Amino acid sequence: MQFSASDNVCLTYESEGTGQPILLLSGYSGIKEEWKYQKEMLLAHNYRVLTMDWRNHGESMRTSKNLRIYRLAADIAELIEELKLEKIILVGHSMGASAIWAYISLFGEAKVAQVVTVDQSPKLINDDCWKYGIKDIYWYNFWTKISLWGKQHLNAINLNAEFVSELKIQRKQHPFDYELNQFLLVNHMEQDWRDIIAAIKKPQLFIAGECSPLWSSKYATFCANIAKDADVSVIKHVGHLVHMEAPEEFNQILLTFIMKRNDEE
């Protein structure tokens, strides 16, 4: 399915099932098919599951327009409005988490029930007072290091071979253009979401990979400590692709949090 954003960029999304809506959002260069294991589990528990390809990602339209995190936030808002969603659970991996924080910054929490963010530090560039950003990236070497982005090995555990083949087919049909999207990456890396995380009133869950090659998993504990109402879970042995590397453990953590928080309402 497709809808046209307010800047006339056509975005592709999928919506399956009925019940409380859960929107699964991928990271930079990610595609909606990466949520296969989560979709299967959530549909089996009678949730409505939505996935979306960001602009320039997957099956969505290629464009040079509005390649900024706050535009991705607007895309989330417009999808929510298009489908008249309420009490939505937002789940974002990597840059998808940043887009969620940007959405709440702009549009508030009225339509949101819970927020789940997966292996995403709230501030990516380190400084004298912050050590949980991308390893070895500071403002003084930012432009040198960013040229290497997209070439890292992000997982610590091998993914299921059949699953990898499915993703490769999809990526080959809809290749990601790193050069076209570099401005989006730069904008993503420049943000600092700590104040937004601290202000969110709805329940938050921070899931991190113990062996993430990007940053220390200690960022998740920091976020939970500054949040008003939050849980934290660090999954052992996995890297950045937490939901794909350990889908069964990830799914159990996600489902337990969702059901517990729904029961508390």
Image (cartoon, rainbow, N blue to C red):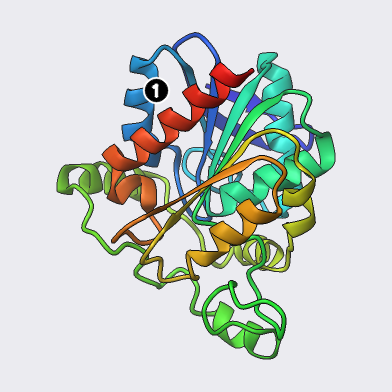
Q: Residue at x 56, y 58 (%)?
A: 221
Query: Residue 25's x, y, as percent?
Result: 53, 40
Name which residue type carries label 1: Leu
Q: Is residue 131 shown left or right of residue 210? A: right
Q: Is residue 176 above or below residue 261?
A: below
Query: Residue 182's x, y, as percent?
Result: 61, 67
In the orientation shown, which residue stands out farthest toward the top? 18
Q: Residue at x 72, y 68 (%)?
A: 190
Q: Is residue 108 above or below residue 1?
A: below
Q: Dot 1: within a 10 Å radius of its alpha carbon, few (fewer than 14), some, or many (20 or more) residues?
A: some
Q: Residue at x 64, y 17 (%)?
A: 265
Query: Residue 32's x, y, as percent?
Result: 45, 38
The answer to whether residue 204 is visible is yes
Q: Quadrant of residue 72?
A: top right
Identify which residue, 149 or 5, lies in the foreground: 149
Q: Quadrant of residue 33?
A: top left
The residue indicated by pointer 1 is 42
Query: Residue 38's x, y, as percent?
Result: 37, 32
Q: Residue at x 70, y 54 (%)?
A: 226
